[in-house]
Structures are given as C-alpha cells and as structure tokens.
Amino acid sequence: MEEYFRARFGREPGVVASAPGRVNLMGEHTDYNGGHALPTAISQRTTVALAPRRDRRATVHTALGDRSHAFTLGEEIRRNAWSDYVEGCTWALRRDGFAIAGFEATIASTVPAGSGLSSSAALEVGLLRAMREAFALPLDDVALARLAHDAESIFVGAHVGTMDQMAASLADERTALFLDTRTLAFERVAIPASVDLVVLDSGVRHAIAGGDYNHRRAECEDAARRLGVSALCDVPLADLDRLATLPASLARRVRHVVTEHARVRDAVAALHAGDAERLGQLFLTSHASQRDDYQVSVPEVDCLVELGWEDPDVYGARLTGGGFGGSVVMVARPGTAARVAARAGAAYTRAMGRTATALVPLTS
C-alpha cells in the first residue's frame, strides 16, 4: 500500500490502517429494529494509506476502478458515488467538533462490493482509523463505529443499523460479536472447533443505499407505530398473535424480525455448547424467514443455500447481509470447508450460469 501511495502522491504516507469486512452469523435486519446481531470478521480488508496536508483539501485515490476524487473539508456534498463514504466520514468528524485538516489518501480493498459483507463499513472504519492516528483524535472503537454509522446512514442516506460498523471496528475472525445494537454492549463468543464456516459470494450485487433496503426499514417503522412499540424487537415472541391486526405484508416483516431476534440468542447458546447441528438448524429457519417473510432473497442466493442443504457435510446455510443479492454463509463439518465451497460453486455454475466466489472464514 505504501508503494501505491508513493506512486500516486510522490511522498510517503503518514499512516496505514485497515478494517475487515464481516459475515453475519445471525440477526439479519434486527439491528435497525433495536435488537441483537451476531457478526464475525472475515480476512478480506479495506486498507487506507494517508498523509495529512496543511490546508483543507482532501484527495483520495481508490484502486477500485483506478478513480480519484478531491474535495474541500467543510464543503462535503452527496454525489451518489463511492466518494460519498469518504466525504461522509469527514462530515461526521467535523460535525462532532474533531480537529482535522486536509489529506491525501489511497484506498484498496479485498472486500467485494455489493456482496453483503459490509464493504462500505470496512471503508468507513478503515478511513476513520487512519484519520484517528494521523490527527491524534480521541476516539475509542465504539465512538469510531458510531461516526462511521452516521456517515453512512445520515450523509450517504443508506438507513442501515449499527451492526456493520461495530463489526468492522470491533470484530475478529476467532470470535463472533454478540451485539446489542440498541446499547452497543457486546460480548465475544468463541467460534468452536466443531464447525467450519463457508462464505460464498453469489455474484449478484446489491446496493444498500438503494430503495429496496430503505423500503424494508420504512415498513418496520410503520409496523412499530401500529403496534405501539418503539422498535420491533420490543415485541415478545409470545405476542405474535398481535400480527393479525396488521396488513399481511407488515405482519410478515414483523414475524421475521421477532423470530430472528430470538434466533440470535439461540445461536449464541449453540456456539457456547459447540452444537453444530443446532446452529445449522437455526441457519435453515433464518433463511426461510428471510426468503418468505422478509422477502429479501433472490433465486441465485436460494440456489446456493439449497446446495448447502443438500451437502452431507453442511449443517445449515443462510443468506447473510442485507439481501437482494450478496452472499451465503454455511456451517459445515470441521475440515470440510474448502471441499464444500468447491462442490457448491461447481453446482451453482451448472444451475445458474454464474460463478460463486469462496471467501473466508474457511476454517479447515
């Protein structure tokens, strides 16, 4: 990364920082509904090299598409482009009174964009980590995640919850982050040796800043108002009979959120117990809920999930991430991850004419 920076700007970077993508093991669409989630980090990362300037000018070059963008601090505007995530970070820092100057930066990433693995959060957290070091900003990891979330949810306009930024800032590859998205309290839960995790990118791209995701969030907010709760995860699992008062589409959304919220705690218990079969069953019911009640899956993702279900080495598979494309996570027998990924990938190409890319964690 240093050589890349030198080639673009003709000087040494002052700092190099990075942040990981994430795969969510359980808790899809619960984070913006006041609930729990269970992400873990993947080894794919976004890396930022940065050197401060003495003025208010910022110039950023990304290896993705070999593109550059320049802007002036204090004049950030949304352009509906990749640069919005950069300008959103400087906007959030300035809004909260942090003293920053201009800078030059390069960005490179191995987190595939639009894969449901939080490429945007990895960029935001990686850039904010670099700026934290370069400008000696008094930010802990949770405060940094909050700023990254505001950059995306307010400035960019993608109405995401806090899970992605918290995972990029705090998660690691050895544990799952059991996260209360309302309070941001978290617990690290070891991923047992009794499972391998397989992550397959379907190749179908989504855009969280687009209309479908934000529409789902609006539906949840509408349902919460109708039910008289501040957030859908306040609805007890035992109170699902209240859904009869809602329009059918809203009832389906609530049923997913409430049952998914319960599945997070069940998944944590399965991890603590090393119960791979139980975890796999939770994956299956979670995917069915996302497909049928939340309606965020697509045929290609369903195909990959079904291929996982059919594999004798796989305990369960599910859509991970915001949906409308993206990736699948599978829980498999220890030592089988690479073979499972190869079998599923080959069958997926035969069935859908697409290529599925295997990502870590592949723990075999």
Image (cartoon, helix red, strand yellow):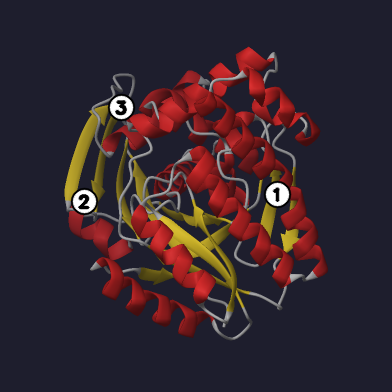
Q: Position of residue 166 (x, y in %)?
A: 59, 43
Is residue 139 among what the camera can see?
no
Q: Which of the numbered marks, if any, corresponds to residue 264?
A: 1
Spatial CA span between label 3 and label 2: 17 Å
Q: Nearer the viewer, mark 2 or mark 1?
A: 1
Mark 3, secondary structure of its residue: loop
Name the side, left or right, on which 289 lies relative to 230: left
The front one of 184 and 305 is 305
Mark 1, secondary structure of its residue: helix
Q: Is residue 333 above or below residue 215?
A: below
What count of labels does the image hold? 3
Residue depicted at x 52% and y 63%: 329
Q: Position of residue 200 (x, y in %)?
A: 42, 66
Residue depicted at x 48% and y 22%: 218
Q: Which residue is mark 2?
A: 9
Name the image quarter holding the C terminus: bottom right
The disc labelled 3 sits on which kind of residue? Answer: Arg
Mark 2, secondary structure of its residue: helix
Q: Which of the numbered marks, if any, corresponds to residue 56?
A: 3
Spatial CA span between label 1 and label 3: 44 Å
Residue 12, by quadrant, is bottom left
Residue 303, by quadrant, is bottom left
Name the side, left or right, on which 352 lies relative to 287: left
The front one of 155 and 254 is 254
Going from N to C along the chain, the mark reached first, 1 or 3, is 3
Is residue 194 among what the camera can see?
yes
Residue depicted at x 34% and y 58%: 300
Name the side, left or right, on which 29 lies relative to 192: left
Name the image quarter holding the N terminus: bottom left
